[in-house]
Image: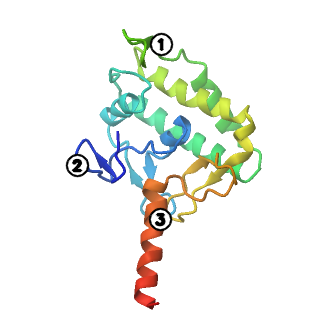
Amino acid sequence: MDDKGGRRGGRQRAKADFRFDDARLCFAFAATLADRGTDTPFERLTRPEDLGRWSVESGCTTVAPVCTEADLDHARRLREAVQRTGRALADEAPPAREDIALINSAAAEPTSVPELSADAASVHWRGDGVAGALSMVARDLIELCHSEHRTRVRICGNPACGTPFVDTSRAGARRWCSMKTCGALAKKRTYRARSQNGP
Protein backbone atom coordinates (compact mmCIF):
# COMPACT_ATOMS: atom_id res chain seq x y z
CA MET A 1 0.00 0.00 0.00
CA ASP A 2 1.10 3.58 -0.64
CA ASP A 3 1.31 6.14 2.13
CA LYS A 4 0.51 9.83 1.73
CA GLY A 5 4.06 10.63 0.73
CA GLY A 6 3.90 8.40 -2.31
CA ARG A 7 6.08 5.79 -0.63
CA ARG A 8 5.57 2.08 -1.08
CA GLY A 9 6.81 -0.32 1.57
CA GLY A 10 9.12 2.33 3.04
CA ARG A 11 10.61 3.44 -0.28
CA GLN A 12 9.79 6.17 -2.75
CA ARG A 13 7.32 4.93 -5.34
CA ALA A 14 8.94 4.10 -8.67
CA LYS A 15 7.56 4.82 -12.12
CA ALA A 16 7.11 1.09 -12.73
CA ASP A 17 4.95 0.64 -9.62
CA PHE A 18 1.29 0.00 -10.29
CA ARG A 19 -1.23 2.69 -9.36
CA PHE A 20 -4.39 1.89 -7.42
CA ASP A 21 -5.03 5.23 -5.68
CA ASP A 22 -8.66 6.36 -5.95
CA ALA A 23 -9.23 4.01 -8.91
CA ARG A 24 -11.78 1.41 -9.88
CA LEU A 25 -10.24 -1.94 -10.72
CA CYS A 26 -10.86 -1.58 -14.46
CA PHE A 27 -9.24 1.86 -14.66
CA ALA A 28 -6.35 0.85 -12.40
CA PHE A 29 -5.70 -1.79 -15.06
CA ALA A 30 -5.88 0.83 -17.82
CA ALA A 31 -3.24 2.77 -15.88
CA THR A 32 -0.69 0.01 -16.41
CA LEU A 33 0.18 2.07 -19.49
CA ALA A 34 1.23 5.47 -18.17
CA ASP A 35 1.88 8.79 -19.87
CA ARG A 36 -0.66 8.09 -22.61
CA GLY A 37 -0.73 11.74 -23.63
CA THR A 38 2.98 11.86 -24.42
CA ASP A 39 5.08 10.67 -27.33
CA THR A 40 6.62 7.99 -25.11
CA PRO A 41 3.98 6.12 -23.08
CA PHE A 42 5.41 4.12 -20.17
CA GLU A 43 4.63 0.40 -20.16
CA ARG A 44 4.28 -1.15 -16.71
CA LEU A 45 3.39 -4.59 -18.10
CA THR A 46 6.69 -5.31 -19.78
CA ARG A 47 6.96 -9.02 -18.92
CA PRO A 48 4.50 -11.82 -18.16
CA GLU A 49 5.72 -11.71 -14.54
CA ASP A 50 4.47 -8.11 -14.29
CA LEU A 51 0.96 -9.27 -15.13
CA GLY A 52 1.15 -11.88 -12.38
CA ARG A 53 2.38 -9.23 -9.95
CA TRP A 54 -0.47 -6.88 -10.93
CA SER A 55 -2.97 -9.69 -10.30
CA VAL A 56 -1.72 -9.95 -6.71
CA GLU A 57 -1.25 -6.24 -6.00
CA SER A 58 -4.73 -5.46 -7.34
CA GLY A 59 -6.25 -7.93 -4.90
CA CYS A 60 -7.63 -10.17 -7.65
CA THR A 61 -5.70 -13.15 -6.28
CA THR A 62 -3.34 -13.89 -3.43
CA VAL A 63 -0.99 -16.04 -5.50
CA ALA A 64 0.63 -14.73 -8.68
CA PRO A 65 -0.67 -16.78 -11.61
CA VAL A 66 1.77 -18.17 -14.15
CA CYS A 67 1.55 -15.93 -17.21
CA THR A 68 2.77 -16.46 -20.75
CA GLU A 69 3.61 -14.00 -23.51
CA ALA A 70 0.22 -14.85 -25.04
CA ASP A 71 -1.47 -13.96 -21.74
CA LEU A 72 0.42 -10.67 -21.67
CA ASP A 73 -0.62 -9.84 -25.23
CA HIS A 74 -4.26 -10.64 -24.43
CA ALA A 75 -4.12 -8.55 -21.25
CA ARG A 76 -2.74 -5.55 -23.12
CA ARG A 77 -5.48 -5.83 -25.75
CA LEU A 78 -8.11 -6.00 -23.00
CA ARG A 79 -6.48 -3.02 -21.29
CA GLU A 80 -6.75 -0.90 -24.42
CA ALA A 81 -10.38 -1.95 -24.90
CA VAL A 82 -11.05 -0.82 -21.32
CA GLN A 83 -9.22 2.46 -21.96
CA ARG A 84 -11.14 3.21 -25.15
CA THR A 85 -14.46 2.28 -23.55
CA GLY A 86 -13.68 4.54 -20.59
CA ARG A 87 -12.94 7.39 -22.95
CA ALA A 88 -16.17 6.71 -24.85
CA LEU A 89 -18.12 6.90 -21.59
CA ALA A 90 -16.40 10.18 -20.73
CA ASP A 91 -17.25 11.54 -24.19
CA GLU A 92 -20.82 10.17 -23.97
CA ALA A 93 -20.16 8.31 -27.20
CA PRO A 94 -20.89 4.69 -28.14
CA PRO A 95 -17.88 2.41 -27.58
CA ALA A 96 -16.44 0.34 -30.41
CA ARG A 97 -18.19 -2.99 -30.97
CA GLU A 98 -14.90 -4.89 -31.11
CA ASP A 99 -13.93 -3.47 -27.72
CA ILE A 100 -17.23 -4.54 -26.18
CA ALA A 101 -16.82 -8.00 -27.71
CA LEU A 102 -13.35 -8.35 -26.17
CA ILE A 103 -14.58 -7.15 -22.76
CA ASN A 104 -17.54 -9.54 -22.85
CA SER A 105 -15.28 -12.42 -23.84
CA ALA A 106 -12.94 -11.73 -20.91
CA ALA A 107 -15.88 -11.39 -18.50
CA ALA A 108 -17.21 -14.79 -19.59
CA GLU A 109 -14.20 -16.52 -18.02
CA PRO A 110 -14.62 -17.83 -14.45
CA THR A 111 -13.46 -15.27 -11.91
CA SER A 112 -11.12 -15.78 -9.01
CA VAL A 113 -12.82 -17.24 -5.93
CA PRO A 114 -13.34 -15.16 -2.76
CA GLU A 115 -11.86 -16.58 0.42
CA LEU A 116 -12.74 -15.19 3.85
CA SER A 117 -9.91 -14.87 6.37
CA ALA A 118 -10.05 -16.88 9.61
CA ASP A 119 -11.07 -13.81 11.63
CA ALA A 120 -13.67 -12.80 9.00
CA ALA A 121 -12.00 -9.38 8.76
CA SER A 122 -10.80 -9.55 5.17
CA VAL A 123 -11.34 -11.29 1.86
CA HIS A 124 -8.65 -12.63 -0.44
CA TRP A 125 -9.10 -13.92 -3.96
CA ARG A 126 -7.73 -17.15 -5.34
CA GLY A 127 -7.70 -18.38 -8.92
CA ASP A 128 -5.82 -20.87 -11.03
CA GLY A 129 -4.94 -18.52 -13.87
CA VAL A 130 -4.66 -14.97 -15.04
CA ALA A 131 -7.97 -15.32 -16.92
CA GLY A 132 -9.76 -15.08 -13.57
CA ALA A 133 -8.09 -11.75 -12.76
CA LEU A 134 -8.82 -10.35 -16.22
CA SER A 135 -12.41 -11.52 -15.90
CA MET A 136 -12.71 -9.44 -12.72
CA VAL A 137 -11.37 -6.40 -14.60
CA ALA A 138 -13.87 -6.88 -17.43
CA ARG A 139 -16.76 -7.49 -15.04
CA ASP A 140 -15.88 -4.35 -13.09
CA LEU A 141 -16.17 -2.29 -16.27
CA ILE A 142 -19.47 -3.97 -17.13
CA GLU A 143 -20.78 -3.21 -13.63
CA LEU A 144 -19.73 0.41 -14.06
CA CYS A 145 -21.52 0.67 -17.40
CA HIS A 146 -24.67 -0.71 -15.77
CA SER A 147 -24.55 1.73 -12.85
CA GLU A 148 -25.45 5.35 -12.23
CA HIS A 149 -21.74 6.15 -12.21
CA ARG A 150 -21.38 5.61 -15.97
CA THR A 151 -22.16 9.32 -16.42
CA ARG A 152 -19.42 10.25 -13.94
CA VAL A 153 -16.51 8.84 -15.95
CA ARG A 154 -13.90 11.49 -16.71
CA ILE A 155 -10.45 11.60 -18.29
CA CYS A 156 -7.64 12.85 -16.07
CA GLY A 157 -6.99 16.58 -16.44
CA ASN A 158 -3.24 15.96 -16.70
CA PRO A 159 -2.67 16.01 -20.49
CA ALA A 160 0.23 13.57 -20.13
CA CYS A 161 -1.87 11.02 -18.25
CA GLY A 162 -5.13 10.28 -20.06
CA THR A 163 -6.38 7.70 -17.56
CA PRO A 164 -10.16 7.39 -17.06
CA PHE A 165 -11.58 7.69 -13.55
CA VAL A 166 -14.98 7.85 -11.88
CA ASP A 167 -15.78 11.21 -10.32
CA THR A 168 -17.64 10.34 -7.13
CA SER A 169 -17.12 13.77 -5.57
CA ARG A 170 -20.26 15.47 -4.33
CA ALA A 171 -19.77 18.49 -6.57
CA GLY A 172 -18.79 16.38 -9.58
CA ALA A 173 -15.74 18.59 -10.09
CA ARG A 174 -12.86 16.18 -9.64
CA ARG A 175 -10.16 16.78 -12.24
CA TRP A 176 -7.44 14.21 -11.59
CA CYS A 177 -7.26 10.43 -11.68
CA SER A 178 -5.62 10.68 -8.25
CA MET A 179 -4.64 13.55 -5.97
CA LYS A 180 -1.58 11.51 -4.95
CA THR A 181 -0.17 11.51 -8.47
CA CYS A 182 -1.54 13.86 -11.12
CA GLY A 183 -3.26 16.13 -8.61
CA ALA A 184 -0.07 16.49 -6.56
CA LEU A 185 1.91 17.18 -9.74
CA ALA A 186 -0.53 19.93 -10.75
CA LYS A 187 -0.25 21.52 -7.31
CA LYS A 188 3.55 21.51 -7.53
CA ARG A 189 3.45 23.14 -10.96
CA THR A 190 1.04 25.83 -9.72
CA TYR A 191 3.22 26.51 -6.69
CA ARG A 192 6.38 26.79 -8.81
CA ALA A 193 4.66 29.13 -11.26
CA ARG A 194 3.51 31.38 -8.42
CA SER A 195 6.97 31.33 -6.86
CA GLN A 196 8.61 32.35 -10.14
CA ASN A 197 6.09 35.12 -10.82
CA GLY A 198 6.34 36.52 -7.32
CA PRO A 199 3.48 37.81 -5.13
Is 141 above or below relative to 116?
below
- Local SS, label 2: strand
- Local SS, label 1: strand
Residue type highlighted by circle 3: Thr
Residue type highlighted by circle 2: Arg
Residue type highlighted by circle 1: Val
- The answer to whether residue 8 of the structure is visible from this angle is yes
In the picture, the disc for residue 11 is 2
Q: Earlier in the sequence, mark 1 or mark 2?
A: 2
Q: Which of marks 2 and 3 is nearer the N terminus?
A: 2
The residue lying at 38 percent from left, 12 percent from top is 117
Task: List the residue tagged with mark 1.
Answer: 113
In the picture, the disc for residue 4 is none
Question: Closest to the observer: 81 or 18?
Answer: 18
Q: Where is residue 142 in the image (x, y as percent from the top left)?
A: 66, 30
The residue lying at 64 percent from left, 49 percent from top is 169
Q: Quadrant of the N terminus?
A: top left
In the picture, the disc for residue 38 is 3
Q: Which of marks 1 and 3 is nearer the N terminus?
A: 3
Residue at the farthest top position: 118
Q: Position of residue 69 (x, y in %)?
A: 36, 32
To which quarter of the image does residue 193 belong?
bottom left
